[in-house]
Image (cartoon, rainbow, N blue to C red):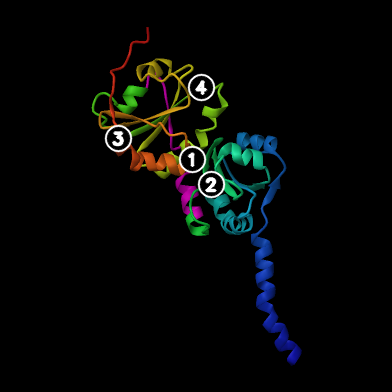
Amino acid sequence: MVQLMRAFKSFPLILCVLFGVVYGELEQISNKSELVKLTEQEEYVVVLFGGDTEETLENELSAIREDLVDSLNAWVVKLEDDDLKKEIDPHVGSDSMIVFYRKGVPVIYKGAASDEELLETLIAHKDKCSRDLTDTSFEHLTQAATGATTGDWFVLFFKEDLAESVSLFPRMETLACLHRGRINIGNVNRGSTGAVTGRRFNVDAVPSIILFRLGRMYRYDSDKFDIDSMSKFITEIYKEKKGESIPMPKSAL
């Protein structure tokens, strides 16, 4: 009888251990090449990059894995690659990080280590949030010089052959999702399809970022390109800057 009681007392502990094992295991992929191949083949891929908070995030992500499979037919995997992790977000440090690829476009999860918040956020961000702007579409979509009826725009000017500017894409996409419905985030290729627009706003060096708000433009002159700093600029710090008048569109000639 005593042995039976001891067995029952230890049963919850055994369950917890087993539960932890089941919920702590994600499929491991080996390298960046394997991830690239997976994101090219699959529409939705959720990746946990290893780090100090790996165990906590893995447990939360494992708890919603089946929900992600059922709702999005998503792949949920784990990758130990500090170089790629810091390439996506150089400011992540030693922490773990969850990145959600949607048709190859990554967005960084910035919420709490909560399975409910994680699931809600990933499903809400299943579509690309930022916009690609060109010389043809810039004024039509932003209406920067004609009243800004489409709202505020925070726009990155980049060149494809400069890694420093291209590396900002995941952070800009994350900003776009975090501020969706309040501010628009756009990307302009200063080296090709947005060359005329770049000249219009005197963008000589890239990466350059400009906030277009209510007929005025505010240049992001900070050397901090982390998500929190840029987010603070578009909500608060721009008010401390002297805005410039927005020039009219230039001819393509």
Q: Is 199 placed above or below 241 here?
A: above
Q: Secondary structure at mark 4?
A: loop
Please name the residue that numbered disc 4 is placed on. Answer: 159
Q: CA distance from mark 1 to mark 4?
A: 19 Å
- Mark 3 residue type: Gly
Numbered circles on residues, count = 4
Who's the residue at 37% across and 35% down the image?
Answer: 184
- Mark 2 residue type: Leu
Q: CA distance from mark 3 to mark 2?
A: 30 Å
Q: Are marks 1 and 3 in contact (CB under 8 Å)?
A: no
Q: CA distance from mark 2 to mark 4?
A: 33 Å
- Mark 1 residue type: Asp
- Between 86 and 140, the one lying in front of the other is 86
Who's the residue at 40% across and 19% down the image?
Answer: 198
Please name the residue that numbered disc 3 is placed on. Answer: 151
Please name the residue that numbered disc 1 is placed on. Answer: 226
Q: CA distance from mark 4 to mark 3?
A: 25 Å
Residue 122 on the magenta segment: yes
